[in-house]
Amino acid sequence: MDSLVVAFFVPALVFVGLVLPIWVIMHYKSKQNAQSVLSDDERHDLAGLISQAEQMADRIDILEAILDSETPGWRDRMRAENHATTPSQQ
């Protein structure tokens, strides 16, 4: 009877102590690697977002150029206003 218990529990302990943790770790690493790759739709969406961000940056540059020509010193006033406000005033 004792040898039957030992014959069952020793392989079970080896499995739970060594094989199972390695198996679980490898499983979740493979899932993480599979999810880190972008699909074609996600790449297309990302390219669209990058394009929109570049367009917005160009528009901001144009607006700043217009403000520079029409309202000289607006940047200094904005910096002064931002430094004058404290978190308690917001």
Image (cartoon, rainbow, N blue to C red):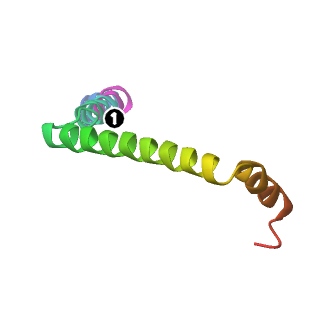
What percent of the width, then of the height, locates residue 50? Answer: 33, 39
Q: Magenta stretch: give its range.
A: 17-24
What percent of the width, then of the height, locates residue 61? Answer: 51, 42
Q: Nearer the viewer, residue 2 or 82?
A: 82
Residue at x 27% of width, y 41% of height: 46
Quarter of the image with the N terminus is top left
Residue 18 visible, this angle: yes
Q: Is residue 69 magenta?
A: no
Q: Residue furthest bottom?
A: 89
Residue 2 visible, this angle: no
What residue type is disc 1 on?
Val
> Circle 1 — which element?
helix
Q: Is residue 85 left or right of residue 9?
A: right
What's the magenta bit mostly, secondary-structure-wise? helix
What percent of the width, then of the height, locates residue 66? Answer: 55, 49
Q: Is residue 70 left or right of residue 32?
A: right
Q: Is residue 18 magenta?
A: yes
Q: Is residue 73 left or right of residue 2?
A: right
Q: Which residue is mark 1?
A: 16
* Disc 1: CA contacts within 10 A as few (<14), some (14-19) or many (>=20): few
